[in-house]
Amino acid sequence: MNQIPRHQIIKHLQAELPRGAPFDLAILARFGVSPQLAAQYAETGWLVRLAQGVYAFPNDEFDIYGALKLLQQRVPGLHIGGKSALALQGVRHNLGSRETWVLWGDKRYALPTWFTARFPARYCHARLFDWPDTTLASRTLTTPPGMPDPIVMACPERAVLELLYDVGVKQSLEEARNLFDGLRSPRKEVLGDLLSCCTSVKAVRLFLTWARETNLIDVDVLLAQYPVRTGSASRWMSRLDDGTLLSLRPHG
Protein backbone atom coordinates (compact mmCIF):
# COMPACT_ATOMS: atom_id res chain seq x y z
CA MET A 1 0.00 0.00 0.00
CA ASN A 2 1.43 3.32 -1.03
CA GLN A 3 2.01 5.91 1.64
CA ILE A 4 0.41 9.33 1.26
CA PRO A 5 3.12 11.90 0.48
CA ARG A 6 3.92 14.16 3.39
CA HIS A 7 3.07 17.33 1.52
CA GLN A 8 -0.42 15.96 0.82
CA ILE A 9 -0.92 15.19 4.51
CA ILE A 10 0.04 18.71 5.54
CA LYS A 11 -2.30 20.16 2.90
CA HIS A 12 -5.07 18.01 4.32
CA LEU A 13 -4.29 19.33 7.81
CA GLN A 14 -4.37 22.90 6.58
CA ALA A 15 -7.73 22.32 4.93
CA GLU A 16 -9.42 20.47 7.80
CA LEU A 17 -8.08 21.93 11.05
CA PRO A 18 -9.48 25.29 12.20
CA ARG A 19 -7.15 28.27 12.35
CA GLY A 20 -6.62 30.12 15.60
CA ALA A 21 -6.37 26.95 17.66
CA PRO A 22 -3.61 24.56 18.70
CA PHE A 23 -3.85 20.80 18.28
CA ASP A 24 -2.23 17.85 20.01
CA LEU A 25 -0.95 14.46 18.96
CA ALA A 26 -4.35 12.82 19.43
CA ILE A 27 -5.85 15.18 16.86
CA LEU A 28 -2.92 14.78 14.49
CA ALA A 29 -3.17 10.99 14.74
CA ARG A 30 -6.64 11.16 13.21
CA PHE A 31 -4.99 12.53 10.07
CA GLY A 32 -2.31 9.87 10.02
CA VAL A 33 0.40 12.07 11.56
CA SER A 34 2.64 10.19 13.99
CA PRO A 35 4.66 11.93 16.74
CA GLN A 36 7.76 11.45 14.62
CA LEU A 37 6.14 12.98 11.54
CA ALA A 38 4.83 15.90 13.59
CA ALA A 39 8.37 16.55 14.83
CA GLN A 40 9.64 16.49 11.24
CA TYR A 41 6.95 18.94 10.16
CA ALA A 42 8.06 21.24 12.96
CA GLU A 43 11.70 20.96 11.93
CA THR A 44 10.86 21.91 8.35
CA GLY A 45 8.58 24.79 9.35
CA TRP A 46 5.23 23.30 8.35
CA LEU A 47 4.16 23.26 12.00
CA VAL A 48 5.20 25.14 15.14
CA ARG A 49 5.85 23.15 18.29
CA LEU A 50 4.28 25.00 21.24
CA ALA A 51 5.08 22.40 23.87
CA GLN A 52 5.61 18.67 24.07
CA GLY A 53 2.84 17.14 21.98
CA VAL A 54 1.16 20.48 21.15
CA TYR A 55 1.44 22.12 17.75
CA ALA A 56 0.00 24.95 15.67
CA PHE A 57 0.30 26.31 12.17
CA PRO A 58 3.08 28.88 11.68
CA ASN A 59 2.07 32.56 11.90
CA ASP A 60 -1.36 31.55 13.20
CA GLU A 61 -3.11 34.11 15.37
CA PHE A 62 -4.50 32.37 18.41
CA ASP A 63 -8.09 32.69 19.47
CA ILE A 64 -8.71 32.01 23.17
CA TYR A 65 -11.77 29.92 22.47
CA GLY A 66 -9.84 27.63 20.16
CA ALA A 67 -7.15 27.26 22.81
CA LEU A 68 -9.77 26.56 25.49
CA LYS A 69 -11.32 23.88 23.31
CA LEU A 70 -8.05 21.94 23.49
CA LEU A 71 -7.71 22.50 27.26
CA GLN A 72 -11.28 21.33 27.83
CA GLN A 73 -10.28 17.99 26.30
CA ARG A 74 -7.53 17.68 28.91
CA VAL A 75 -9.13 19.03 32.09
CA PRO A 76 -12.45 17.66 33.40
CA GLY A 77 -14.95 20.39 34.13
CA LEU A 78 -12.81 23.18 32.67
CA HIS A 79 -14.89 26.31 32.20
CA ILE A 80 -14.72 30.09 32.21
CA GLY A 81 -15.76 31.07 35.71
CA GLY A 82 -16.00 33.81 38.32
CA LYS A 83 -15.78 37.39 37.15
CA SER A 84 -14.80 36.36 33.60
CA ALA A 85 -18.05 34.42 33.20
CA LEU A 86 -20.02 37.31 34.69
CA ALA A 87 -18.37 39.78 32.31
CA LEU A 88 -19.15 37.69 29.25
CA GLN A 89 -22.79 37.46 30.32
CA GLY A 90 -23.30 41.17 30.72
CA VAL A 91 -22.62 41.67 34.42
CA ARG A 92 -19.77 43.92 33.45
CA HIS A 93 -18.14 45.44 30.40
CA ASN A 94 -16.50 42.92 28.13
CA LEU A 95 -13.10 41.66 29.15
CA GLY A 96 -10.21 43.92 28.30
CA SER A 97 -7.55 42.59 26.00
CA ARG A 98 -5.04 42.06 28.83
CA GLU A 99 -7.40 41.30 31.68
CA THR A 100 -6.78 38.03 33.47
CA TRP A 101 -9.14 35.24 32.52
CA VAL A 102 -10.53 33.18 35.40
CA LEU A 103 -10.79 29.46 34.66
CA TRP A 104 -12.12 26.72 36.90
CA GLY A 105 -11.78 22.95 36.66
CA ASP A 106 -12.30 19.72 38.55
CA LYS A 107 -8.68 18.65 39.02
CA ARG A 108 -5.31 20.15 39.87
CA TYR A 109 -3.78 21.60 36.75
CA ALA A 110 -1.11 24.08 35.77
CA LEU A 111 -2.05 26.16 32.76
CA PRO A 112 0.57 25.62 30.05
CA THR A 113 2.97 28.42 29.20
CA TRP A 114 1.92 28.47 25.56
CA PHE A 115 -1.59 29.40 26.78
CA THR A 116 -0.76 31.97 29.49
CA ALA A 117 1.79 33.70 27.25
CA ARG A 118 -1.05 34.57 24.89
CA PHE A 119 -3.94 34.87 27.33
CA PRO A 120 -3.23 36.05 30.89
CA ALA A 121 -5.19 33.60 32.99
CA ARG A 122 -5.35 31.88 36.34
CA TYR A 123 -6.80 28.51 37.12
CA CYS A 124 -8.78 27.64 40.23
CA HIS A 125 -9.30 24.12 41.46
CA ALA A 126 -11.43 23.97 44.59
CA ARG A 127 -14.24 21.71 45.67
CA LEU A 128 -16.68 24.57 45.87
CA PHE A 129 -19.74 22.34 45.52
CA ASP A 130 -20.71 18.92 46.83
CA TRP A 131 -22.74 18.05 43.77
CA PRO A 132 -25.78 15.90 44.63
CA ASP A 133 -25.58 14.52 41.10
CA THR A 134 -24.03 15.38 37.75
CA THR A 135 -27.20 17.10 36.55
CA LEU A 136 -26.76 20.28 38.62
CA ALA A 137 -23.09 20.53 37.71
CA SER A 138 -23.83 20.34 33.99
CA ARG A 139 -26.92 22.56 33.94
CA THR A 140 -25.05 25.38 35.69
CA LEU A 141 -22.57 25.49 32.79
CA THR A 142 -23.71 27.24 29.66
CA THR A 143 -22.69 28.25 26.15
CA PRO A 144 -24.29 31.69 25.64
CA PRO A 145 -25.44 32.84 22.21
CA GLY A 146 -22.49 33.88 20.07
CA MET A 147 -20.05 31.72 22.03
CA PRO A 148 -18.46 28.95 19.95
CA ASP A 149 -19.47 25.43 20.87
CA PRO A 150 -18.28 23.56 22.94
CA ILE A 151 -16.85 26.40 25.08
CA VAL A 152 -18.69 26.50 28.40
CA MET A 153 -18.84 28.98 31.25
CA ALA A 154 -20.52 29.16 34.62
CA CYS A 155 -24.05 30.55 34.58
CA PRO A 156 -24.35 33.83 36.53
CA GLU A 157 -25.65 32.13 39.69
CA ARG A 158 -22.67 29.77 39.80
CA ALA A 159 -20.18 32.39 38.64
CA VAL A 160 -21.07 34.78 41.47
CA LEU A 161 -20.37 32.09 44.08
CA GLU A 162 -17.03 31.37 42.40
CA LEU A 163 -16.33 35.10 42.57
CA LEU A 164 -17.20 35.30 46.28
CA TYR A 165 -15.06 32.25 47.03
CA ASP A 166 -12.09 34.21 45.65
CA VAL A 167 -12.70 37.30 47.84
CA GLY A 168 -9.72 38.11 50.02
CA VAL A 169 -7.46 35.76 48.10
CA LYS A 170 -7.38 36.60 44.39
CA GLN A 171 -10.32 38.96 44.37
CA SER A 172 -10.79 42.33 46.10
CA LEU A 173 -13.87 42.81 48.25
CA GLU A 174 -14.66 46.16 46.60
CA GLU A 175 -14.65 44.86 43.04
CA ALA A 176 -16.65 41.79 44.07
CA ARG A 177 -19.32 44.05 45.56
CA ASN A 178 -19.42 46.19 42.41
CA LEU A 179 -19.92 43.08 40.31
CA PHE A 180 -22.53 41.73 42.71
CA ASP A 181 -24.47 44.98 42.37
CA GLY A 182 -24.65 44.34 38.63
CA LEU A 183 -26.55 41.05 39.00
CA ARG A 184 -30.06 41.12 37.60
CA SER A 185 -32.93 38.65 38.11
CA PRO A 186 -31.06 35.53 39.24
CA ARG A 187 -33.04 32.29 39.15
CA LYS A 188 -34.09 31.49 42.71
CA GLU A 189 -34.29 27.74 42.13
CA VAL A 190 -30.76 27.62 40.71
CA LEU A 191 -29.42 29.76 43.55
CA GLY A 192 -31.19 27.59 46.11
CA ASP A 193 -29.73 24.39 44.67
CA LEU A 194 -26.21 25.86 44.48
CA LEU A 195 -26.27 27.40 47.96
CA SER A 196 -27.49 24.06 49.34
CA CYS A 197 -24.36 22.27 48.12
CA CYS A 198 -21.80 25.10 48.33
CA THR A 199 -18.91 24.13 50.63
CA SER A 200 -17.65 27.70 51.24
CA VAL A 201 -19.27 29.30 54.30
CA LYS A 202 -17.65 32.60 53.29
CA ALA A 203 -19.19 32.54 49.81
CA VAL A 204 -22.64 31.54 51.11
CA ARG A 205 -22.78 34.14 53.88
CA LEU A 206 -21.35 36.90 51.72
CA PHE A 207 -23.98 36.16 49.11
CA LEU A 208 -26.81 36.21 51.67
CA THR A 209 -25.51 39.43 53.26
CA TRP A 210 -25.25 41.32 50.00
CA ALA A 211 -28.50 39.87 48.68
CA ARG A 212 -30.28 41.31 51.73
CA GLU A 213 -28.60 44.69 51.33
CA THR A 214 -29.45 44.96 47.64
CA ASN A 215 -32.85 43.21 47.72
CA LEU A 216 -31.57 40.94 44.97
CA ILE A 217 -33.81 38.15 46.23
CA ASP A 218 -35.98 37.49 49.28
CA VAL A 219 -33.37 35.83 51.48
CA ASP A 220 -35.84 34.67 54.14
CA VAL A 221 -37.97 32.89 51.55
CA LEU A 222 -34.86 31.32 50.06
CA LEU A 223 -33.71 30.05 53.47
CA ALA A 224 -37.18 28.68 54.21
CA GLN A 225 -37.33 26.72 50.95
CA TYR A 226 -33.77 25.40 50.65
CA PRO A 227 -31.31 23.76 53.07
CA VAL A 228 -28.69 26.46 52.52
CA ARG A 229 -25.29 25.70 54.05
CA THR A 230 -24.69 28.63 56.35
CA GLY A 231 -22.36 26.89 58.83
CA SER A 232 -22.56 27.33 62.60
CA ALA A 233 -24.70 29.83 64.48
CA SER A 234 -21.73 32.08 65.23
CA ARG A 235 -20.27 34.84 63.08
CA TRP A 236 -17.72 33.88 60.43
CA MET A 237 -14.75 36.23 60.72
CA SER A 238 -11.58 36.58 58.70
CA ARG A 239 -9.04 39.30 58.06
CA LEU A 240 -8.48 39.79 54.34
CA ASP A 241 -5.10 40.35 52.74
CA ASP A 242 -5.72 44.11 52.62
CA GLY A 243 -6.37 44.19 56.37
CA THR A 244 -10.17 44.39 56.13
CA LEU A 245 -11.98 42.38 58.81
CA LEU A 246 -14.81 40.44 57.22
CA SER A 247 -17.54 39.54 59.70
CA LEU A 248 -20.54 37.61 58.40
CA ARG A 249 -23.68 36.49 60.21
CA PRO A 250 -25.14 33.06 59.39
CA HIS A 251 -28.21 34.28 57.49
CA GLY A 252 -26.93 37.54 56.05
Image (cartoon, grey):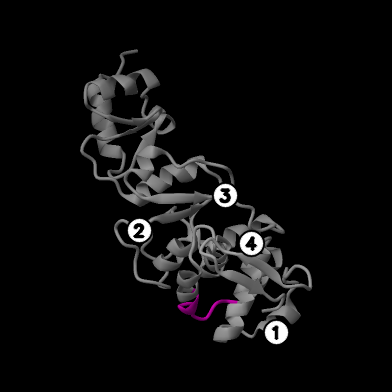
Q: Is residue 68 above or below residue 214?
A: above
Quadrant of image for the C terminus: bottom right
**Residue at x 57% of width, y 42% of height:** 108
What kind of residue is marked 4?
Answer: Leu
In the figure, residue 227 lies in which quadrant?
bottom right
Residue 186 covered by magenta stretch: yes
**Image x and y of residue 119, in percent:** 35, 49
**Residue at x 56% of width, y 66% of height:** 164
Dots 2, 1 in contact, CB < 8 A? no
What kind of residue is marked 3?
Answer: His
Of badges 2 and 4, nearer the viewer stands 2
- Whole-number angstrom distance, CA of label 3 to CA of label 4: 18 Å
- For mark 4, what is the residue? 136
Helix or strand or loop: what does disc 4 sit on? helix
What kind of residue is marked 2?
Answer: Glu
| Residue 233 appears left or right of 118 | right
- Closer to the N terminus: mark 3 or mark 4? 3
- Closer to the N terminus: mark 2 or mark 1? 2
- Closer to the N terminus: mark 2 or mark 4? 2
Q: Main secondary structure of the magenta part?
A: loop
The answer, for residue 135, to whether it is visible in the render is yes
Label placed on residue 125: 3
What kind of residue is marked 1?
Answer: Val
- For mark 1, what is the residue? 221
Quadrant of image for the N terminus: top left
User: What range of the chain is rendered magenta?
Assistant: 180-187
**Image x and y of residue 47, in percent:** 27, 29
